[in-house]
Image (cartoon, coloured by chain):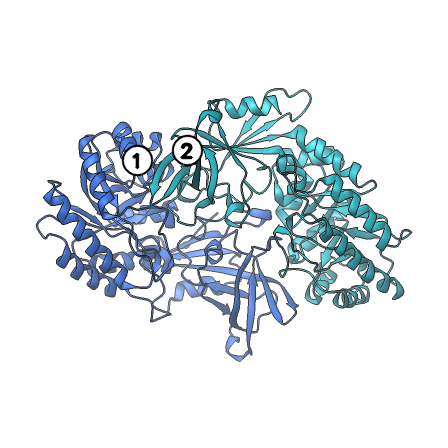
Chain colours: A blue, B cyan
Amino acid sequence: MNVLMDSVLRDTRTVTPSLILDFNVIKQTYDRFLAAMPGSTVYYAVKANANPQVLQLVVDKGAGLEIASLAELERSLDAGATGERIICSNPIKNPIFLERMHREGVYAMTVDSTFEVEKVARYAPGSRVYVRLAVDNTGSVLPLAGKFGVDGDEALKLFDLARDLGLQPIGLSFHVGSQCLSVNNWVNAIRACGEVWQVAAARGHRLHFLDIGGGFPAGHYHTPSIPTIEGIGAAVMDAVAHYIPRDDLQILALEPGRGLVGESGRLVVSVVGKAKRGSDEWLYLDAGVFNGLMETYEGFPPVVHLLSDDAAERPTMRYTLAGPSCDSCDVIARGVELPEVHIGDRLVFLDAGAYTNEYAAAFNGFPIPRWVALNVGEADREPAVGD
Amino acid sequence: MNVLMDSVLRDTRTVTPSLILDFNVIKQTYDRFLAAMPGSTVYYAVKANANPQVLQLVVDKGAGLEIASLAELERSLDAGATGERIICSNPIKNPIFLERMHREGVYAMTVDSTFEVEKVARYAPGSRVYVRLAVDNTGSVLPLAGKFGVDGDEALKLFDLARDLGLQPIGLSFHVGSQCLSVNNWVNAIRACGEVWQVAAARGHRLHFLDIGGGFPAGHYHTPSIPTIEGIGAAVMDAVAHYIPRDDLQILALEPGRGLVGESGRLVVSVVGKAKRGSDEWLYLDAGVFNGLMETYEGFPPVVHLLSDDAAERPTMRYTLAGPSCDSCDVIARGVELPEVHIGDRLVFLDAGAYTNEYAAAFNGFPIPRWVALNVGEADREPAVGD
């Protein structure tokens, strides 16, 4: 489906493990978000992949950035973003980070506790703030509920407190959970926001900002049951029209991370060992939980293929896939169906553009995947390679 | 209990998060291992903490090193270790690593599958090999069973295959699981090794190497139910005398990682935020699962104290501890009893000398703990600080 990507994956000179990103896919995906949710603003969730080339592309496309830390702010500014194109959706921020965001004119930041409202008022006085509502995460692969978010009553109290402390309450945000497979999560969350919004308006808060967070799933192209950007977008636009006062809303914010960059990446690895243990067939790869595939340990099922011209002729097997370290936690997946695999064969993990190198450590001496960027710019026809 | 450590922990100029290691504790712990298991050889498991200063100390003390990868081999050689002081207990090794170990004269390496025996014979011909037995991991905090190890019958087949392919089968190894709290695991494993050893001897294999692996737990000094090095050592020496033919055994190998360096380290962190969510009190720290406390996500219960002169006067609370990232997986522990904690307070995690910075990634822009080494050498009275 992608000739350049395919040729790099199959080129045995490509060092393994390598993370190969096709920037054309990111560009096309960005355009799909805007087309699916007309008038919205994409704030790319930097945590998904903070590589400078990715941030540069996002800024060049005119998107905003969603950050969580001082280092992410600096990387965003380095990529050419200005403060008013940046929001911070981390509900917990340290004083140095707050002061710096204030100085750079970051557009707005989230709060979800009285402690945080007080901290923001002290270190970033006068800031625009939005409150994160806790919403149903059922149906997402990695639920985010529990650690962040408040209910509607608490949100109203935080609006009042923020106003009392000289901050500007501007709206609401939520997060449906990472890789969310249920479109209804967005609809229900937007309805919940609408209810809070109406009461807040009646209390004199003039809201204009609705941040529907991330959670946009990758992988519809190989798993049709995964919702599309277009399908989610239609439901979101319908819910917004229904539940959010039309004249109030000025900014409909999206925070795709995986949703924007996930499908652009492939992780190519080598099989370095095999073992039959009881009735289980084990494959040991040169990337594992610690050096690139941490999400599998969090419960994310990988989509993996054998890279071989004779794959179709080999018998189908069921494998346990393990990483290269001596750590027993370093098991990627069990019961994975693949054509019979030999030592030295290469496998490719799809949808690896997000949370691969970001989570990775060179534990036990096994290197983090090399970085290969394809189609970075019109004039850049050679793949960019780096560590 | 340690004046220098305590003064650094309580010095508000100490940046957080910082990982502070007292090298005197490592030296004393090394001596305790040798005293508890006379005649044994310590092969420090480099994966636990591969900081060059730690490796240098280990080599200077005369210990060996246990490695798993090319990068760990290079770090060991850089620290002054020679090949004959190094063993490799990673059952899966890539060809480049095998060739390099062969060239450097690494003393021995483990195998636990026919594929691996063939690979070692091809890329490191003539090498000494030992077979890893799968043993009971019940009672260890982080069981290692499943990914590695074979039963006795398979071990005997691998000895025969290794001999047939020109390798030198020298012995057996096992791993009781990380932070093993049951002394009987070592005893049972050594008995299992003894049974295989006797049959192997009858088949003409002249074994001389028994590697009892790692798993030595840290923390007896604060939790008396955790076994001591001395208690484990007495049981091990007794079991070895009982089950392993006395005239055969030349090398009794230990692979302490956490057991050697764990108690030497303290991780000091700051509290950057608080929230009350339902009935739960949350504390948000500047180190979490991704940037230093990954082991807590694997199920390892942290031991954490409040650093405050008035700690005794504060009411006791129960907290959920979370890391700084936006990731909901970044929750360190729940139901932790601490004196009431305020934003800006500092906490210290004990027994942080192993698997802290090794597992860490700067995900979401939150930095890996700074490194502070105390008592590195007699002449070195100033703490060494670095990134």
Q: Nearer the viewer, residue A87 or B133?
A: B133
Q: Split into 4 quadrants, where in the image is the N terminus of chain A? A: bottom left
Label number found at residue A35 = none
User: Where is B11 relative to B191, above or below?
Assistant: above
| Label 1 chain ID | A
What is the secondary structure assignment of the residue under circle 2? strand
User: Where is A185 relative to B301, above or below?
Assistant: below
> Label 1 crowding class (10 Å Cα cut-off): few <14, some 14-19, many 20+?
many
- Residue B109, picture quadrant: bottom right
- Residue B198, picture quadrant: bottom right
From where the camera sits, is residue B286 visible? yes
Residue farthest toward the right in the current orientation of the protein: B247
From where the camera sits, is residue B102 visible? no
Image position, residue B265 (x, y; %): 59, 34
Q: Which of B375 and A376 is in front in this view?
A: B375
3D distance between C-alphas at marks 2 and 1: 12 Å
Residue at 25%, 50% in the rendered image: A61
Please state if B158 lies on the left or on the right of A75 as rendered: right
Amino acid carrying label 1: it is Glu
Residue at 17%, 52% in the rendered image: A195
Residue at 79%, 66% in the rendered image: B156
Q: Name the residue under label 1.
A: A116
Q: Name the residue under label 2.
A: B271
What is the secondary structure assignment of the residue under circle 1? helix
Amino acid carrying label 2: it is Val
| Label 2 chain ID | B
Residue under disc 2 on the same chain as residue under disc 1: no
